[in-house]
Image: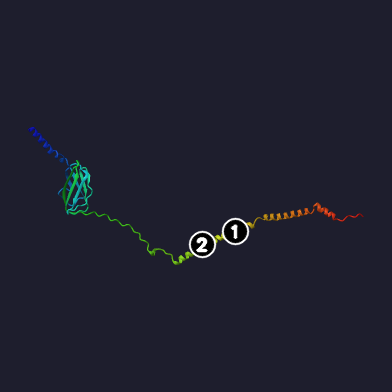
Amino acid sequence: MPVRILRLLLVLGALLVLPTVPAAAHDELVSTTPADRATVDVPPGELQLVFSQPVLAVGTQVVVEDPDGNLIGTGEPQVAGDQVVVPLPDALPPGEYRVRWRVTSGDGHPVTGDLRFAATAGTTAVAAPPVAPAPVTAAPAPSDMKVPAPGVAASTAAAEPASDSAAVRTVEGAASASAAKTVDAVTSGPSWQLLAVVGGCALVAVLAVAVLAAGSRTPERVAARADRRPPRTEG
């Protein structure tokens, strides 16, 4: 009987001790910048949390409240090993700030906590450098625009038809000169051509006379002439 009771006590003791072992393995917050309950001259540009072991980026959250209890916008927490860095805005008022954080330890269990710090003076946002405006080119005034006088416009309009008429006369003169050259070329041929024409006409005339003369000497006409001669008388 005593042995059974002893075994039961050992089992109960083990059950009570085992749940505390994983809790001891959770990550713990080692230090912060600014430190908890510290007073600084001005609010820092970032918060830094350092833990006992590397933490996971999944599930990491950091919330900051200003002296009036309003949430201020922070940058995305940056996790690097056992450190978590949170950027803060440039312009922050003086007073006490509260930081609530939540991280995921290496074994996957969430760990939460909070801290406070105070700032004696506030900060202001850094003004951006002024941007020089782009140069603007002014449109020309109506007085700067050159408008031709009415007389100049009329003379220009009249000069255009005159130039067209001159061009037409030039083309017609060139055509007349070309036609005259063609006629002169035909009428002023070489003299041997005229001689050839006259010689040809003379040759035709001579041939016509010869044909007529030959026709008058045929045998029938010679016999007819002999019959018409008077008979010769013997004396």
Pick the front one: 172 or 121:
172
For label 2, the residue is: 164
Q: Residue at x 81, y 52 (%)?
A: 220
Residue 179's mark? 1
Relative to 141, does residue 61 appear above or below in the rendering?
above
- What amino acid type is highlighted by mark number 2? Asp
Q: CA distance from mark 2 to mark 1?
A: 23 Å
Pick the quarter of the image with the C terminus.
bottom right
Pick the front one: 25 or 126:
25
Give the image's coloring scheme.
rainbow
Position of residue 81 measured from the top left corner of the image (x, y, whole percent): 21, 42
Residue at the front extreme, as displayed: 1
- Tag 1: Cα neighbours inside 10 Å, few (<14), some, or many (≥20)? few
Q: How many marks?
A: 2
Q: Residue at x 47, y 64 (%)?
A: 157
- The reply, left or right, for residue 166 in relation to residue 90 is right
Position of residue 54 measured from the top left corner of the image (x, y, whole percent): 20, 42
